[in-house]
Image (cartoon, rainbow, N blue to C red):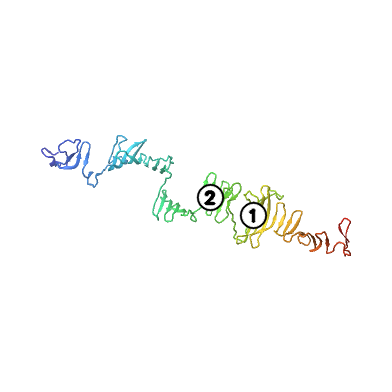
Amino acid sequence: MADLTGESISSTYNTLLTTAGADISGSLQAIQDGRGNPSALKLSTSTVKVAGACVISSGSSDSALDILSTVTEPSAGGNPTIKINANNSTTKGLRFKAENAGGVIYAMQSGGVNALRFGYSTDDSDITESMQIDSAGRVGIGGTPSTRLEVINGAHGVTVNTGVQATFGSNEASSGINIVGTNTSQGRIYFGDPESSTTGRITYDHSNDSLGFATNGGTERMRIDSSGNVTVPTGNISSHTYGTATTGEGFRIGATEIYGQTSAADKVKISVNGDSYFNGGNVGIGRTPTTRELEVAGDILSVSTGTSAMIRIEAAGTQTTVGTAANSGAHLSLLNTTDTDDVFSRVDFLNSNEVSYAQIVGQATSQDDRKGELAFLTSDDAAPTEAMRIDSDGNVLVGAAPKIHASSTLAYYTNQAAGKTILSTFDSNEKVTCDATGYIQFETAGAEAMRITSDGHVILANVQEGDSDLASGTIYKDSSGFLKIVA
């Protein structure tokens, strides 16, 4: 070792930092180099102050504090580059400050949780926590995390399922994730596995406002367009079963049809180019069905592209007595729900201009007495008018004027315009006419055979009482006043 007796500090260790000869006290004291030149470092018993950059390493830096460490990482068993120890939970760690506000990074146990916490302070004292990383590596923004990442906007009180990696919760009316982009960009959520990081995908395309769903390598399988229409590309639908696996109940989608099934059989089928059916229960269109297999609220239109069309109602009725309701077979019911007399229901026959040319009308003449009549209407270059009616007594009335009246015991024809009432056979060759002027006329073979005049005279083929020498006999008046013909 060299002998330094009599040598000055500056001649031997010119870079050694020393004080100016006084001990370090509570006041900052400049530190000199070996030549007595002041350095940028000032020390006191409580403070270290560096003017300019402080580099704890070799080399230079343009930062206020630059620490270069060669120690191994903590996870590898080494020591950290900077260690800040706090002896109680109120010591806050590392603070970043501008004016009277700033951020704080600190480690603290709170509620039994050890965590590295990130916060801010506006008054240089109280700290509001914004984020934390707990001892399990979970990150919580706005609160204590229960999953690997949890963004919390107020306590939501929800217990998150096991296996969830990220949670977004709020105690407000709504919460969600917002993926934004330009008017022509796409927002996407990917689902991946070891073979492909994008094997599944949900895409919102802002250029056409559609939502697409892709599976098995990112191939789009379904799309919802801007009008809400759902489309599935051709060939992308194969038979699948959706529902409860233990019972087999649910819907099955095929390439061109949808089935609704139970464990026993298909109950519903909707096909794009084949037969469709519903036999799982009652069907309601525009209303909830009650007791009938099909109930429709509104009008029904049946259109045929052929030259004929038919509505067929089938039932295996066993009743043979007409008028009995039970087991009466197929029937058509028309219900008018208005509870007043003389309301009616009808069947219309329409021409190609969709105007009525004939009608069958059922009229409720008395609701309380359950009386009704059936009218038949026809048209002659105008709206249909009544041509025949069956009244509540069973009488048949044909025409407005004249009319044919028929019942189980009587049939007669009236011509109200001519003032006549006529009882006639259907071919009108034999008939009795009661004229409004007061006579009764009898016809046979289409010609008048006898007449009784208004004053009581009887005329037979223009022969009056008292005439004789008749080829067919003699007419005379007997003692009782009856007119007789003797052959």
* The quadrant where residue 184 appears: bottom left
Q: Position of residue 269 (x, y in %)?
A: 56, 51
428 vs 186, nearest the viewer: 428
- Between 241 and 420, the residue placed more toward the observer is 420
Please state if 329 lies on the left or on the right of 103 as rendered: right
Determine if residue 195 is in view. no
Circle number at residue 346: 1
**Which residue occupies 53% across, 47% down?**
250
On the image, the x and y values in percent for residue 344 come to 64, 53
What amino acid is found at the position of numbered circle 2 in the picture? Arg
Tell me the amino acid under the disc marked 1. Arg
Specify the quadrant that holds the N terminus.
top left
What is the spatial separation of the Cα atoms under label 1 and label 2, in whole angstroms? 44 Å
Circle 2 crowding by C-alpha within 10 Å: few under 14, some 14–19, many from 20: some
Judge whether 168 appears above or below 442 on screen. Answer: above
Q: Looking at the rendered structure, which numbered label has been put on residue 124?
A: none
Please state the horizontal and vertical placement of residue 437, each as a whole percent of the image: 77, 60
Toward the viewer: 442 or 455? 455
Q: Quadrant of the C terminus?
A: bottom right
Q: Any mark on residue 252, and which?
A: 2
